[in-house]
Image (cartoon, rainbow, N blue to C red):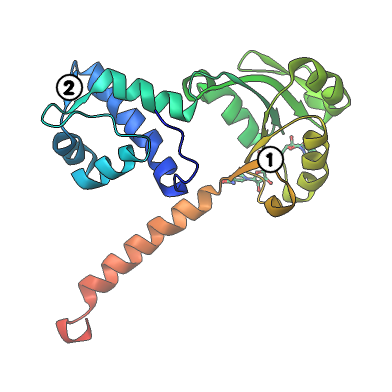
Amino acid sequence: MSKNEKVSKSVIRRLPRYYRFLGELLREGITKISSRELAERMSVTASQIRQDLNCFGGFGQQGYGYNVSELREEIGAILGVNAKHAAVLIGAGNLGRALAVHLDYAKYGCRLCGIFDSNEKLTGASLGGIRVSPLSDLESFCAKAKPVIAILCIPKDSAPDICEKLISLGVKAFWNFSHYDMPQKNLPGVTVENVHLGDSLMALCYGITNSETEKTESPDQM
Ligand code: NAI
């Protein structure tokens, strides 16, 4: 695979879906698939699949299709799912607990190795086999475990200070649930993935609202 610096974010965002579908195919015992068949299963066009995969040099053979296992491995390598990046979770409240306990980090290229909360009443609680530590231990923890990812499950107002601290301690990527808009432009070398579950819900509401509008609108209103 040739590394292409100009791969668009939208292509990168589609790769996890390819990876997941290819895993499902393997579990069904399917070892070879054409871009047309894959496109049908994924409800996208075959040309979209070919274009996306061509960004990385293309993987299929004309008239043969894709080797499912090889393609999944290649996409996994592009995404870095075998990397086991060390991650630290900040904020062991409702959201933090859910993410600590219910997510299989290894599946996504990460290894959750520390959980911190400013509320010392939570110190020592075990979440998914990891003990919650006080913030006073963050520095020594980072020096030892060298986390490169931080998962922020703290209120917006608490986020700026902790982000700055984490960056100074070597964190390079933020999975940010905190609603704090990190000033990414001023943070060279830092990657931020903002997650707002509410945005997804609002998109759903938009979908419902608009399909209802379509139903109630008379043809000449459309
Ligand atoms: P929560 O109140 O249950 O937990 C927040 C935890 O963060 C508390 O345990 C608190 O002690 C801790 N904390 C506060 N400041 C801290 C700091 N500087 N360092 C370490 N720990 C600190 O709240 P919940 O429900 O877990 O939500 C967490 C945040 O995530 C909230 O601000 C909420 O708005 C946001 N949220 C975002 C979602 C999204 O889709 N992006 C979805 C749900 C919540």
Residue drawn at x 18%, y 19% is: 30
State the image coordinates of residue 163 (x, y, percent, origin top left): 77, 41
State the image coordinates of residue 187 (x, y, percent, origin top left): 73, 47
Q: Are marks 2 and 1 in contact (CB under 8 Å)?
A: no
State which tag comes first along the sequence, 2 or 1.
2
Seen from the viewer's position, the closer of residues 23 and 49 is 49
Residue at the left extreme? 63
Residue picked out by circle 1: 189
In this rendering, the answer to whether 196 lies above or below 168 is below
Seen from the viewer's position, the closer of residues 112 and 39 is 39
- 46 lies left or right of 169: left
User: Is the CB of mark 2 within 8 Å of ligand 1?
Assistant: no
Give the amino acid at mark 1.
Gly
Query: How many residues crowd around disc 1 within 10 Å: few (fewer than 14), some, or many (20 or more)?
Result: few
The image quadrant of residue 90 is top right
In this rendering, the answer to whether 88 lies above or below 144 is below
State the image coordinates of residue 94 (x, y, percent, origin top left): 64, 35
In this rendering, the answer to whether 18 lies above or below 24 is below
Residue at the right extreme? 136
State the image coordinates of residue 45 (x, y, percent, origin top left): 20, 47
In the image, which disc is placed on residue 32? 2
Residue at the top extreme? 129
Residue drawn at x 40%, y 44% is: 11
Q: Is residue 110 visible?
A: yes
Q: How many marks?
A: 2
Residue drawn at x 42%, y 31% is: 2
Disc 2 is placed on an element classified as strand
Seen from the viewer's position, the closer of residues 61 and 141 is 61
Give the amino acid at mark 2.
Lys
